[in-house]
Structures are given as C-alpha cells and as structure tokens.
Image (tube, helix red, strand yellow):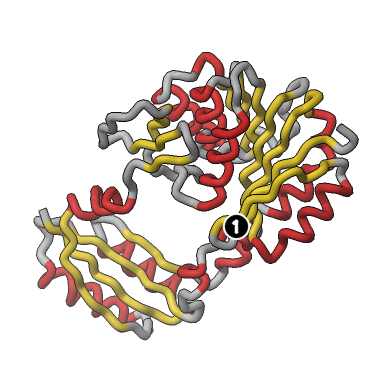
C-alpha cells in the first residue's frame, strides 16, 4: 500500500497555524519537523553533547509539516482543500508530495541495523536476525530508549564490560536507557544488576529488553534521579550519559563502590574530556584508563587511594 506524504514548508511564525490546518484536513496522521528550539529542548533532557551534527545543521527558521494520506484517500480532492485553507489562514508555504509505501517506513530503517561483534565476547543481534556464534548474544532492537550498541559511547562501555566482567559482580547502571549495559554485564556473568533512569519510558523499555534476554530475575529497573535509587555497594558502576550529568553525580559515586570496584563513565564529547577528568578527580575518583572513539570518550575509574 502506498500512502502520500504532503509536506508543506512554512516560516516558523506560521507553523502553529499550518499544523492546525493540517489537523483539520488529515485523517492519516501528522509529523512536524521543527528544529528551532533544538538546543533548549536537548538541554532540558540532558546536554547538548548528545545532538548529532546532522540535526544541528537543520534550518531553524522554517518548519516542515507532513500530512499523510491513506491509499484510499483521493489526493485530488484533499490537496485543493488543504491549499485553500492555508491561503485563507494567510500561511506562506511551499508544498510537495511524495509516495511512501507503508512497508517502507515500517521496515526501511532495518537496513541500517545489523549484528555487531564487540570486544572478544559480545554480539549485539537485532530480533529479526539469526546469528550463529559462540559469542554471548544480546538481543536488542532499536527503540525510543538510547542504547543499542551502534553509538560510539555505548560501544565503548560494552567493550569495557567485556574486559572487566569476570563473573559474580553486582552492577549499577545509571541512566540505563535501553538497559543494554546491565543486560550485557548479566549475560557475561554478573550476578545481579540495578538500572535507574529518570524517564519512565526507558525503565519500561529496559524491562522489556531484560525479558527478551532472559535476565529479568537478576535485573531490577527503577525510575530515579541518577544514583538516588542505588542500594548498597557495587563492583561495577556504569554511566553512559553526558558530561554535565557525570560531573553532577560523580561526588556520590565513591560511596557506592566496593573495594576494587570500577566506575565506567561515557557519553563524554572529546572537547569536554579534560573538564570531566578534573571533576572526577575532585570527586575522589582516579581515572585508570581512557578510551576514545570518533570524538567520544569513556573513562574507567577506581576509588582514589586504592
């Protein structure tokens, strides 16, 4: 089945009216591309470090309103009505239409996500693929929660866990997202893991991924503000978040570390490496190894004085 994407480009000032007009006309759904407040919205969630350059390059003075028509709707009837209402509303716009096959938007992204081998022991495998391997398999599909293994920051953490997990560890994953780091640690042999995240959606997704990977009985996922839900001490603590959040939570980390424990901090853009290293040392954490990959940094720390 082929749907029709009617896309209008309007000045930011006309975006609200254009969306209202599209809502009145459309039956098949609306999608808004508005990047004008990108930095502010990202800062409210985490930090500007996480924004991809492709998004940063998007124009800020215009908004794209996509209106989707189902295959049984008549474009020749809908389009004149849509344009008439835009003109009546005084909206300045340009318009184009594109045919979109339903199966294309449901499945096209799959071609970008395939099995990945990380470290010496791990393989991240999407649910729609089978992979014959002796490696430890983590089944993980792309979702709304961050962390599938494709991003450099997640890959760095997974490679580090592959090196550090020997078996029997207690793990804390701060900002767990998809739960991939805790799940990987458990499947590599860790005894138990706790994951905390401020986003309830992430907590739900992490729980679903834990069930998919058969580790639900050893993985406790909680809604919380970084480490405030932690209980006791841990052998491994991971925080694949952003520089600002790492600096904020670092002072509380040493108290959560067992003797000989390691803290894995990632999600750090390379331009903030020195700032984060200084903050970690000031918090009583001693960096023992620094890994870098394509502009991203992962720092492995021990408690100072050990």
Residue 13 can be seen, yes or no? no
Query: Against 299, is 127 above or below?
Result: above
Residue 44 position within the rendered picture, expressed as x and y whole percent measured from the top left: 65, 56
Q: Nearer the viewer, residue 42 or 237?
A: 237
At 60% from the left and 23% from the top, the residue drawn is 166
Expressed as whole percent of the image width and height from the top left, the position of residue 203 reads 54, 33
Identity of the residue drawn at 72% across and 24% down: 234
What residue appears at the point 64 percent right and 54 percent down from the top-left corner?
Answer: 297
Q: Position of residue 278 (x, y in %)?
A: 83, 55
Identity of the residue furthest to the top in this view = 217
On screen, residue 125 above or below 278: above
Rendered location of residue 195, percent (x, y): 61, 30
Q: Secondary structure at mark 1?
A: strand
Number of numbered labels in the structure image: 1
From this viewpoint, is residue 79 visible? yes
Instruction: From the viewer's perspective, tell me whether residue 284 is left or right of residue 114.
Output: right
**Dividing the picture into quarters, in which one does residue 104 lie?**
bottom left
Work out whether residue 253 or residue 65 is closer to the camera in this orientation and state it: 253
In the displayed structure image, the side of residue 262 where residue 212 appears, left or right: left
Q: Residue at x 12, y 58 (%)?
A: 2
Query: In the rendered image, which quarter is residue 40 located in?
Result: bottom right
Disc 1 crowd rating (10 Å Cα; few below 14, some 14-19, many 20+) is: many
Q: Is residue 118 left or right of residue 115?
A: right
Nearer to us in this view, 140 or 228: 140
In the shown orientation, is residue 284 left or right of residue 2?
A: right
Give the position of the C terminus as an image quadrant: top right
Q: Which residue is mark 1?
A: 296
Q: Is residue 164 above or below residue 142?
A: above
Q: Quadrant of residue 114?
A: top left
The foreground one among 225 and 191 is 191
């Amino acid at each position: 089945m082929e749907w029709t994407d009617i896309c209008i480009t309007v000045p930011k000032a006309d975006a609200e009216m254009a969306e209202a007009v599209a809502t009145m006309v459309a039956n098949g759904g609306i999608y808004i591309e508005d990047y004008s407040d990108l930095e502010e919205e990202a800062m409210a969630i985490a930090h500007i470090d996480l924004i991809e350059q492709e998004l940063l390059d998007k124009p800020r003075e215009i908004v794209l309103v996509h209106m989707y028509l189902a295959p049984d709707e008549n474009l020749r009837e809908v389009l004149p009505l849509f344009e008439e209402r835009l003109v009546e509303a005084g909206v300045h716009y340009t318009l184009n239409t594109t045919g979109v096959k339903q199966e294309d938007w449901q499945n096209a992204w799959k071609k970008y996500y395939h099995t990945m081998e990380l470290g010496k022991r791990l393989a991240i495998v999407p649910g729609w693929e089978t992979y014959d391997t002796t490696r430890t398999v983590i089944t993980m599909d792309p979702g709304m929660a961050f962390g599938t293994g494709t991003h450099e920051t997640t890959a760095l953490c997974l490679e580090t866990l592959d090196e550090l997990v020997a078996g029997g560890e207690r793990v804390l994953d701060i900002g767990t997202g998809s739960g991939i780091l805790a799940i990987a640690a458990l499947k590599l042999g860790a005894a138990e893991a706790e994951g905390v995240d401020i986003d309830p959606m992430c907590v739900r997704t992490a729980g679903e991924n834990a069930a998919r990977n058969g580790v639900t009985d050893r993985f406790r996922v909680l809604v919380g503000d970084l480490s405030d839900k932690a209980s006791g001490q841990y052998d491994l603590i991971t925080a694949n978040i952003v520089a600002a959040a790492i600096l904020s939570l670092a002072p509380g980390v040493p108290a959560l570390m067992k003797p000989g424990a390691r803290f894995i901090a990632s999600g750090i853009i390379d331009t903030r490496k020195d700032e984060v290293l200084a903050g970690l040392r000031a918090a009583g954490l001693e960096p023992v190894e620094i890994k870098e990959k394509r502009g991203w940094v992962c720092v492995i720390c021990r408690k100072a004085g050990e």
